Amino acid sequence: MIHPVPPGTRDVLPDEMRELRALSGSLHATFDRAGFGEVWTPALEYEEVLRRGDERAAAGFRLFDDRGHVLALRSDATIPIARLVANRYATEPAPLRLCYFAHAYRAVERGSGQAREFLQGGIELIGVGGAEGDAEVIALIVEALSEAGLNRHRIGLGDGMLYRTLLANAGVSDEDAQPLLESLWRRDLVGLEVRIDRLGLTGSARDALVAVPALRGGREVLAKVPGPAAENLSAVHELLAERGVADRVIFDLGLLRDLGYYTGTIFEVYDPAVAFALGGGGRYDELLGRFGPSRPACGAGLDIQRVHVAQIEEERGT
């Protein structure tokens, strides 16, 4: 008799577990050498804490404690670390460099092939603003994956506020904008165009909302969207070039991440062996201020099991 496990979860047996431990150890060693100290936060947080960080963050799994408080399993590590920084490091001078390895839990659509429970490892750089901080985080992620044996990974680089700015400039209300943003982070460009046309937009505003999400490539695509976002992305690229990793970057101006706390540069990590992104992150300058003193911040998280798949395929030469 087979006893099922919940959809989107899985058992891990000793051989794979040893490999996951070794991979996590390699990533941790790279983060540690760069000065990122490891922290641990509870798997359970008060729902109100997660919602303070982002309304979508507590949409997965909820339960009640013995006093009737609503608890939720963390869906990412960044919001709990923002809370931790406010509680433990409110008077600590910047910068703070923190890393983590922990499970996270998300509600996913049945049949999507995505995990509800996944092991995540990542970094948070707090107190370093602008392109300098963005480049440090991206370069460290590239280095950590290279040290773990991956050589084919690439970085899709965009800006979390670019499309929101286009919507605001076109006069689209927050209520009407939300379905468009959801289509964009799902990469449903056909559905996005349909929703744009339903709003009755015409002319250059409509054209920009349709065309910009399809812009991908080298630095030449930045010339098609002049403004602060393009200037910052160009600055990040220059700093990555100085670190010798700019060849890993593909600009993706339609990139949008599903959590809404990002305020600038965003990125995702790709590998040809895995259908989904290995991870991603970006700048979230307003998040820390929801819990304590406002500080600029940028971070990144990797799905360790997806990285493991890419590692195996690379070793096989496929």
Image (tube, rainbow, N blue to C red):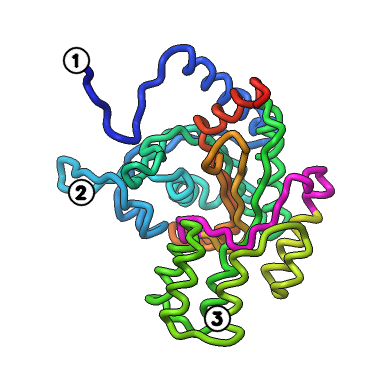
Specify the label residue 19 is tagged with.
none
Q: Along the polypeptide, which appears first: circle 2 or circle 3? A: 2
Specify start and end residues of the magenta stretch as a single range: 239-261
Badge 2: few (under 14), some or many (20 or more) residues near its Cα, within 10 Å? few
**Amino acid type assigned to the residue bearing label 3 in the image:** Arg
Q: Quadrant of residue 270?
A: top right
Q: Nearer the viewer, mark 2 or mark 3?
A: 3
Badge 3: few (under 14), some or many (20 or more) residues near its Cα, within 10 Å? some
Label 3 sits on residue: 206
Q: CA distance from mark 3 to mark 1?
A: 57 Å
Drawn side of residue 198 relative to residue 1, left or right: right
Label 1 sits on residue: 1
Label 2 sits on residue: 69
Q: CA distance from mark 2 to mark 3?
A: 46 Å
| Vertical placement of residue 290 versus 72, above or below | below
**Residue found at x 33% / y 51%:** 58
Query: Could one spot residue 161 in this view of the protein?
Result: yes
Residue 179 is covered by the magenta coloring: no
**Amino acid type assigned to the residue bearing label 2 in the image:** His
**Residue found at x 61% / y 64%:** 214
170 and 132: which one is in front?
A: 170
Badge 1: few (under 14), some or many (20 or more) residues near its Cα, within 10 Å? few
| Vertical placement of residue 16 versus 253, above or below | above
Q: Quadrant of residue 9?
A: top left
Q: Quadrant of the N terminus?
A: top left
Drawn side of residue 88 relative to residue 117, left or right: right
Q: Position of residue 190 (x, y in %)?
A: 49, 65
Q: Position of residue 41 (x, y in %)?
A: 42, 38
